[in-house]
Structure formats: structure tokens, C-alpha cells
Amino acid sequence: MAVIKINSTNFEEIKKSEKKVLLDFYADWCGPCKMVAPIIEEIAEENPQYVVGKIDVDDCPELAIQFGVSTIPNLVVLKDGEVVNQIAGARPKPQILKMLEE
């Protein structure tokens, strides 16, 4: 499954997913975000049991505020529409997968 570009228009639909959701808050100008991007793509392709989405904090500041994102990259895991895990900063693939499994 491909990474979904999330914005305020489609966010509510994504939030209602029965699958766990991984949200990657990023910005195009952010170096660490660029390092995490290929990992996020891999996770999306290899793990169809999750919904994986990216949220550009410059395009959707309201979503960043809603999740208390002050540092990017910022990864958020939702289950049943609720935050179950959140971590800021670039992380290796095993650590991101562990977030999803918890």
C-alpha cells in the first residue's frame, strides 16, 4: 500500500480506519524528514496491515497543532482514532515498526 498524503480534507476518514495508522508529520525543507521518508515508504509497502500517511506541517498547521507537533519529523500512531504512540526525531525502521506493534 502506498503512503497517503493527508490533509484536513481526508484526515477524518483516515482517522476512522480500523487499521492502526502511522502519521508522519514532515516538511519538504527538513533534512531529518528526508532521511525518514524512504523508511516510511518501505513500511507502507511492506505492511498492508497499517495505514501510512504523511502530513506536511506547512500545508496543514492545524493538524500539527492538534497533535502537539513542535518538532519534525514527528511520528504518531493512532488506534481507533486515538494516539497510542508518538515520537519526535528521525528514527530507524526497527524502532518505527516497534511503535506500531505496541
Image (cartoon, rainbow, N blue to C red):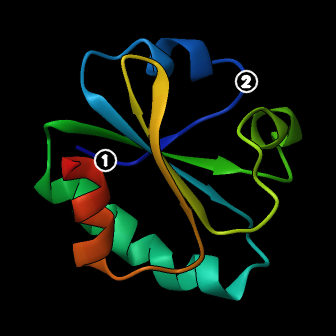
Q: Is residue 33 left or right of residue 38?
A: right
In the rendered structure, which disc, 1 or 2, sits on the residue that comes first in sequence? 1
| Residue underneath mark 1 | 2
Asked whether the beta carbons under mark 1 and mark 2 sit within 8 Å of each other, the answer is no
Q: Is residue 51 left or right of residue 68?
A: left
Q: How many marks?
A: 2
Q: Residue 4 location in percent, x, y?
A: 45, 40
Q: Residue 68 location in percent, x, y?
A: 77, 45
Tag in front: 1 or 2: 2
| Residue underneath mark 2 | 8
In front here: 5 or 75?
A: 75
Residue displayed at 23% across by 48% down: 102
Q: Is residue 76 left or right of residue 52?
A: right
Q: Residue 92 location in percent, x, y?
A: 34, 82
Q: CA gap, disc 1 to disc 2? A: 19 Å
Q: Residues within 10 Å of mark 2 (few under 14, many from 20)?
A: few
Q: Is residue 59 above or below residue 42?
A: above
Residue displayed at 49% across by 12% down: 13
Q: Amino acid at mark 2?
A: Ser
Q: Amino acid at mark 1?
A: Ala
In front here: 102 or 92?
A: 102
Q: Residue 58 location in percent, x, y?
A: 86, 53
Q: Secondary structure at mark 2?
A: loop
Q: Is residue 88 left or right of residue 95?
A: right
Q: Point out the image quarter for the N terminus.
A: top left
Residue 60, labelled with which disc? none
Q: Secondary structure at mark 1?
A: loop
Q: Residues within 10 Å of mark 1 (few under 14, many from 20)?
A: some
Q: Is residue 77 above or below residue 88?
A: above
Q: Is residue 38 above or below residue 101?
A: below
Residue displayed at 46% across by 21% down: 14
Residue displayed at 73% across by 24% down: 8
